[in-house]
Image (spheres, rainbow, N blue to C red):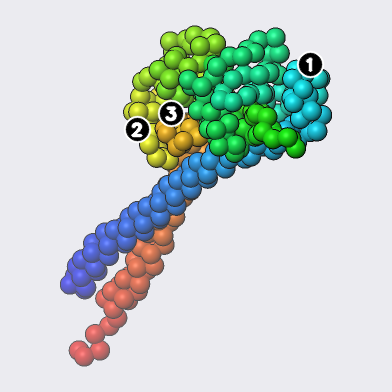
Amino acid sequence: MKTLLSKRRKVLLAVIPATLLMAAISAYASISSHHALLEACKHRELQLVATLIQNDLQEQLTKAAARASIAVNLPSVQEAFRAGNRERMLDRVLPVYVVQRDRFGVIDAQFHVAPATSYLRIYAPEAGHGDDLSGFREMVVSANKDHESRKGVEIGREGVSMRAIDIIKDEQGYLGTFEVGMSFMTLLNNVKKNTGFELGVFVDNDLLTRIATLLPKADAERIIAGFQNIGATDWKQIKPLVAPEILTQASDVKTELKTVAGLHYGIVTVPLLDYKGINIGAIIATQEFETYQTQMQAAIVRAVGFSLLQALVIAGIVIVMVNVMFVHTATQPDLSK
């Protein structure tokens, strides 16, 4: 009987650690699976935000082009332009501009004549007549030279915006161009509304300083690694997360996960290209990812709890089976005597 009980003890000493090891492996596999799944979800969400930023940028440019097209195709505008009647042009376009400015983020509306001379600024009717823009407004120069519409991002004296330029002509021939500029805040607010991310736009500060001479001087805290923030949905949330290397290395769309002050964040970087495809800055989007961390912690608790329960059940079954096998055998009479 002592031999049987000794064997029973050895079996238990071997089975119980093996059961605990299996439970630990099961817990680790479950936790790893959940971690991989949540990491994939984070990166998918970040990629989706990057795509939405790019799509909304193109959508705003298309809307700007549509608004410009409406103005240049109004016969009354064409007639007034041909006659050199600024007052009539202003009467036709200004009421529409005010509505577009107040409701849809249009910040610039301007007529030009070749090569790139300001003819009528709808947003500032008393200023700018005859100003030569050819030294810094290449989109205007190109549109007037080739008699073709243009759209893209470009810096002007008032700052940087999403712009579209269309040509104006009548039966007698070419007249000039009309430009519509959209605020970047429209894009930022749209993406935030659809995703919950906070966003900011950063532009090369040297370019802004040289070209945007009518733009107020930026606060020092708004300039990071030579890039100036020209708009943000919530600057206080964005500023701590924008490291200099994020801006200086913004040559491609990038997504990353970052921990700041114990909190987990997702960050999206989309290069900001001008109408010629030259990188002049970046659009940054970020959101706290604590929800994912809470889900991960809950998954760990579930995995560990389930594995311990599994170990207890298996161990219990094994102990019962061992007892039945060894104890029952030990209590049986020896019929050979």
- Residue 249: mark: 2
- Front residue of this view, candidates 30 and 48: 48
In this view, which residue lies farthest toward the bottom? 336
Q: Secondary structure at mark 3?
A: strand
Earlier-in-chain disc, 1 versus 3: 1
| Residue at mark 3 to residue at mark 2: CA–CA distance | 12 Å
Look at 35% across and 28% down and name the residue there. Answer: 248
Distance of label 2 from label 1 (alpha carbons): 48 Å
Total marks shown come to 3
Compared to residue 156, the image places residue 249 above or below, namely below
| Amino acid beneath label 2 | Gln
Identify the residue position indicated by label 1 in the image.
87
State the image quarter where residue 10 is shown.
bottom left
Using the image, determine if residue 96 lies above or below residue 217.
below
The residue at the point 29 percent across, 58 percent down is 21
Identify which amino acid the numbered label 3 is placed on. Answer: Ile
Q: Nearer the viewer, residue 104 or 43?
A: 104
Q: Quadrant of the N terminus?
A: bottom left
| Label 2 crowd (10 A; few <14 / some 14-19 / many >=20) | few
Residue 80: x, y in percent?
78, 24
Residue 316: x percent and y percent? 38, 63
Q: Nearer the viewer, residue 18 or 256?
A: 256
Q: Secondary structure at mark 2?
A: loop
Q: Which residue is located at x 55 percent, y 17 percent?
A: 132
Label 1 Cα crowd, 10 Å radius (few <14 / some 14-19 / many 20+):
few
Q: Can you give x and y, in whole percent of width and height, for residue 293 in the image?
A: 46, 39
Q: Which mark is residue 280?
A: 3
Q: Is residue 139 left or right of residue 91?
A: left
Disc 1 marks a residue whose amino acid type is Glu
- Residue located at (41% from left, 25% from top): 242
**Circle nearer the N terminus (3, 2):** 2
